[in-house]
Amino acid sequence: MLLLLLVLFFPITRALFLSFFEYNLATFEGAEFIGFKNYLDLFSNSSFLSALWQTLYFVGASIFLEFVFGLGIALILHQQFKGRNLVRGLVLLPWMTTPVVIGFMFSRLLNASYGVVNYIFMSLGIISQPVAWLSDPDLALQVIVAIDVWRETPFVTLILLSGLQVIPMELYETARIDGAGPWARFRHVTFPLIKPAIAIALLMRTMIALRFFDIVWVTTRGGPGGSTELLGTLAYKKAFQGFRIGYGSAVSFIIFVLSLIISLVYISRLHEQRGRDI
Amino acid sequence: MGRKIGYKIFLYTTAIFILVTILFPILWIFLTSFKSESELSTFPPVLWPSQFNFNNYIEVLIESKYGVFAINSLIIGIAATTLVLILAVLSAYGYSKFFRFKEQKLSLVAVLIARMAPPIAIVVPLYQVVQRLGLYDTKIALILIYSAVAYPLATWLLKTFFDDIPESVVESAIIDGCSKLQVLIKIILPLSTPALASTVTITFLTVWNRFLIALTFSATTNSKTLPVAISALSHAEYGVQWGNLSAISIVTVIPVFLIGLGAQKYLTAGLTAGAEKY
């Protein structure tokens, strides 16, 4: 508990505190209290605003896709077929893979000059010439979303699958006897019963996606031209490369507040669910 | 009957598609790590190296300092996991239903909120603390910070598992004259080996994969971990050494895959319990 206090709660209060200061490590001047100026600066600064929008876009797009794919895969892995356990076992691999390795892996696969993705897409006729996936400002953020979907869909699948597994089989039998087709069974039996699992998976994903850093850092470092700059990379750059500790603290405090809001929703959601179980 | 066969075909094709999407990138990098210099920069890319040469591995592990990073990662991973396990077992026991104290609820919520705190929000202010304590670029700093970051989830997991132990078992032990600590060691821990396995697996995997904290607090071979080394290599000044990077990436993910797949049952149980239980 003491360690927790020192390493987690102290820094967050300290971040809030620092964010009210102009504190530049490069100038050797002491910290100067400037009140809300860092925050005012942020909201009139175009690089912060675009990082904020890009983060929200990233979170929204990746979580939507992870939900669609995660639900689809969970439904398939819930069916009976040979080799199901093998697929279930391997499906978690992307989630286990070190994020930095994932970043490197995809920068190799998507490389403009000798990446295999270009080769495959060209042979399939999807594209006519090599595409610079990660250095095209219009594409890079979409590609980052796709990489995150590759990594995080297994997590959503896992949570939804565990939700599916507790649905009693008799419910499906009853529905079948009542003449419900597959879609009606999904709509009226499966979906309402896994709704709590869906809520939890999505809330957890939102929390994690807000702090997304590793993969962008390895693949694009926020570039090209800031097109993949997210709040996480911006805070890091300001604090450790621009030495503007106060400003970086302000950005990181905004990340904290955003994820705190989501986590409070999540906690109250868990609370509700427990109330229902008892 | 025809519909049934169509359904089976659909199931198997999607299952195979899922597997290919998951395995292809990893397998590609695995094969890349055995390719020779010339095979690395051809287009169309070659799938299978003409001969499996281990040069990349030899260069990475023996001829350069990357072996040291692997050892750092290992030391930090094992030390942090051990520390987390000891602290989490003790506090989870305190938080479980076998104890009641006034601040229990409040500090449990604190643990839960701490679990949600994004690393980027703590890294900026923590930087000064670490430097003032003279711990910058030491393994101790990373071990302590990683432990603090992993502690909340571990405590939470163990608490929910301890709560599932029937009260009667513990009561009869107390009647037999066991102290509270003896109850923990003799009764609760032997009953919770699966829970401990889950906690160890998740803690080790997340500590091993973490990047941002090590990126901030390490500078030299003293404390640099594998992810930091990979990220530095993939933005190398004199062009990217794809072969070496592939080899070191494979070295990085091997322990994760071995543990993750070997203890898959515990990993799955821990992940779902960590997300859903309260």
Image (spheres, rainbow, N blue to C red):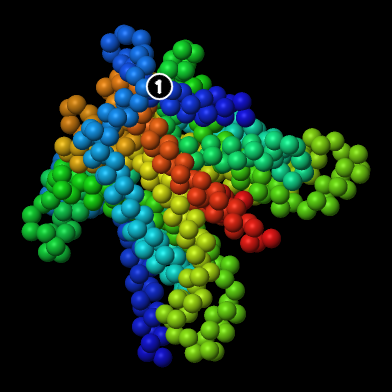
Kindly tell me whether residue B173 is visible in this rendering: yes
Residue at 43% across / 26% down in the picture? Answer: A15
| Count of labels in the image | 1
| Residue B176: percent from left, percent from top | 91, 43
Residue at 36% across / 83% down in the picture? Answer: B6
Against A155, residue A228 (above or below) is above
Kindly give the residue lying farthest to the right in the view shown: B176
Which chain does tag 1 point to?
A: A
Residues B272 and A266: in front is: A266
Residue type beneath disc 1? Leu
Against A85, residue B85 (above or below) is above
Quadrant of the rendered image containing residue A226: top left
Quadrant of the rendered image containing residue A240: top left
Against A257, residue A265 (above or below) is below
In the visual, does A254 lie left or right of B49? right
Residues A42 and B116: in front is: A42
| Residue A124: percent from left, percent from top | 15, 64
Kindly give the residue lying farthest to the left in the view shown: A128
Q: For the N terminus of chain B, which image quadrant? A: bottom left
- Judging from the image, what secondary structure is the residue with disc 1 in? helix
Residues A263 and B49: in front is: A263
Residue at 26% across / 44% down in the picture? Answer: A54
Kindly tell me whether residue B246 is visible in this rendering: no
Residue at 70% across / 35% down in the picture? Answer: B103
What residue sits right under mark 1 in the picture?
A18
Residues B228 and B117: in front is: B117
In the visual, does A77 lie left or right of A112? right
| Residue A128: percent from left, percent from top | 8, 59
In the visual, does A142 lie left or right of A268? left
Q: Residues within 10 Å of mark 1 (few under 14, many from 20)?
A: many
| Residue B260: percent from left, percent from top | 49, 48
Against A222, residue A23 (above or below) is above
